[in-house]
């Protein structure tokens, strides 16, 4: 197994046996543009202060290059936009629903499709129908909304990711893998485990993938214990690309084939259509079990909408069906992950501390190494995201102690090992030149001679605090 995956350039052996570097390019050209403007430092200082030093609270018109998230920020293709015009906006039984159902079955392989407005809608329904108070839900590292819904339903999340997933120095090619011993232990000792929550890729570990060998073993172990495997398939196509590039025996398979095999080891999935499937809104819950699917359909009408639209317009379902077809193309994935690697490569060669291997949807900065003297209680990653915005108008996202929130029982902060800032790349939106600008800004912040003192939280919302918390600067 090698760590090399798609790189910003590939090597071709010519007839003269000389090695020449050849670049890849995106498999699309630009038909419509959206202007963005660079603000002054004075404007950014005012905007950040008004936003309480939380990049989620900035107005997008005050942002130059928006790397807050890859969620719902993709550019749709002309084929997807054409599909929008074919929206069948019937309340019940829209033909776009049946197209989406058929597409999800063909590419993800699950029997039942319950549409929802976005990923957390699916997490809510899954948690409510499967988790009982006192249950334990093992997972390969927490995700904010996923853990929230598990705990809200009375469950307790237990992290069973391999130790490498928490280790910034590890170059393990599949840092998202489940530690099979930890999983066995939970399955043997917990009172009741409703399912294992398996994410591919693992967002909070740095967009790190899970290997096919690992999901196969997870399946075998869970089957022995009679416990279903529920996949967070939000970025499972990106995961498939990493398997193709890094796992023996998969180089000649397509992303689509790998995705289908991966999902075949799981019993259902939650999906935020705002990521891999290349749309601005939408999601679904898939289940193979008929009884569970019936329960989910009963519930979706209460919280999302009828079971043939689940909060989406017909045109949104059509755009998502078409987005899925485009997302599983190898050429798309090569360029998508190639762009993330391009940015990561620039930063790494400039000596900026990032999570390695470079992940699927984002480059993650190690905030502790930007500010080695800052206590985690002073929010280093939140501070770093604010400093990057001040420097250049680039918007990033905190993925450290603020995102980790508080223990629902003790009320104390969770102290995650990883204190990261995420530079998340929207799909098909920015060019390589934008990535150059981002890298220069982050490097400038890394080299700043005068370091900030950190932040103090002055408003903390009850749930998922990272979205709306407000801060003030410590020190001058
Ligand atoms: N992820 C992200 O920026 C959206 C905002 S942060 C909560 O990474 C996974 C792996 C996600 C995810 C959202 C959801 C929830 C579930 N699983 O945002 O509700 O990365 O569509 O999906 C964000 P929705």
Image (tube, rainbow, N blue to C red):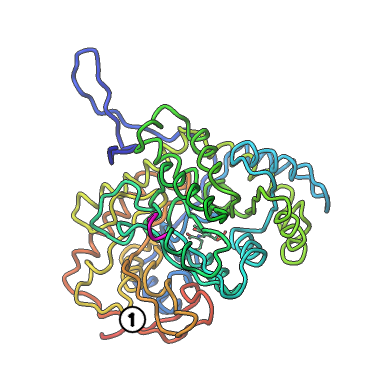
Where is residue 79 shown, x and y percent of the image? 62, 36
| Point 75% across, 42% down: residue | 98
Q: Judge by depth and name the residue closer to the eye, 66 or 263.
A: 263
| Point 25% across, 77% down: residue | 452
Q: Quadrant of residue 67?
A: bottom left
Query: What segment carries the magenta color?
Result: 179-183
Q: Quadrant of residue 391?
A: bottom left
Q: Is residue 462 above or below residue 69?
A: below
Quarter of the image for the N terminus: give it.
top left
Residue 181 shown in magenta: yes
Q: Which residue is mark 1?
A: 455
Hey, which residue is sitting farthest left in the picture? Answer: 449
Q: Secondary structure at mark 1?
A: strand
Where is residue 462 shown, x and y percent of the image? 53, 82
Q: Is residue 27 above or below residue 187?
A: above
Magenta-colored segment: predominant secondary structure: helix
Q: Is residue 419 above or below residue 233?
A: below
């Amino acid at each position: 197994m090698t760590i090399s995956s798609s790189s910003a350039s590939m090597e071709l052996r010519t007839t003269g046996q000389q090695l020449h570097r050849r670049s890849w390019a995106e498999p699309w050209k630009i038909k419509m543009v959206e202007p963005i403007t660079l603000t002054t430092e004075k404007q950014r200082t005012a905007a950040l202060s008004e936003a309480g030093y939380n990049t989620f609270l900035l107005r997008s018109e005050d942002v130059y290059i928006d790397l807050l998230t890859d969620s719902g920020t993709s550019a749709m293709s002309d084929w997807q936009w054409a599909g929008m015009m074919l929206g069948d906006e019937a309340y019940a039984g829209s033909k776009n629903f049946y197209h989406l159902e058929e597409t999800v079955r063909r590419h993800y392989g699950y029997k039942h499709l319950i549409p929802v407005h976005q990923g957390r809608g699916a997490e809510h329904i899954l948690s409510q129908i499967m988790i009982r108070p006192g249950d334990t839900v093992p997972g390969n590292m927490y995700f904010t909304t996923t853990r929230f819904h598990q705990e809200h339903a009375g469950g307790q999340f237990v992290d069973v990711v391999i130790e490498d997933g928490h280790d910034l120095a590890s170059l393990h090619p599949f840092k998202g893998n489940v530690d099979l011993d930890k999983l066995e232990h939970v399955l043997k000792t917990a009172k009741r485990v409703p399912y294992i929550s398996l994410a591919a890729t693992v967002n909070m570990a740095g967009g790190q993938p899970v290997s096919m060998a690992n999901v196969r073993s997870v399946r075998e172990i869970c089957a022995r214990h009679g416990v279903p495997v529920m996949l967070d398939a939000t970025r499972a196509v990106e995961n498939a690309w990493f398997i193709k590039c890094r796992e023996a025996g998969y180089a000649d398979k397509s992303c689509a084939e790998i995705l289908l095999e991966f999902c075949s080891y799981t019993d259902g999935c939650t999906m935020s259509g705002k990521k891999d499937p290349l749309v601005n809104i939408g999601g679904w819950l898939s289940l193979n079990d008929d009884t569970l699917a019936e329960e989910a359909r009963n519930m979706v009408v209460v919280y999302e909408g009828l079971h043939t639209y689940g909060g989406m317009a017909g045109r949104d379902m059509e755009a998502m069906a078409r987005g899925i077809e485009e997302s599983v193309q190898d050429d798309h994935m090569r360029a998508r992950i190639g762009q993330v690697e391009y940015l990561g490569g620039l930063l790494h060669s400039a000596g900026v501390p990032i999570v390695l291997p470079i992940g699927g949807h984002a480059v993650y900065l190690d905030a502790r190494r930007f500010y080695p003297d800052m206590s985690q209680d002073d929010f280093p990653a939140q501070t770093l995201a604010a400093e990057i915005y001040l420097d250049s108008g680039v918007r990033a996202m905190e993925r450290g102690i603020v995102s980790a929130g508080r223990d629902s029982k003790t009320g104390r902060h969770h102290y995650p090992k990883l204190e990261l800032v995420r530079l998340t790349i929207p799909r098909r939106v920015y060019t390589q030149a934008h990535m150059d600008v981002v890298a220069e800004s982050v490097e400038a912040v890394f080299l700043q001679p005068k370091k900030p003192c950190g932040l103090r939280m002055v408003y903390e919302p009850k749930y998922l605090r990272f979205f709306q918390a407000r801060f003030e600067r410590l020190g001058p």
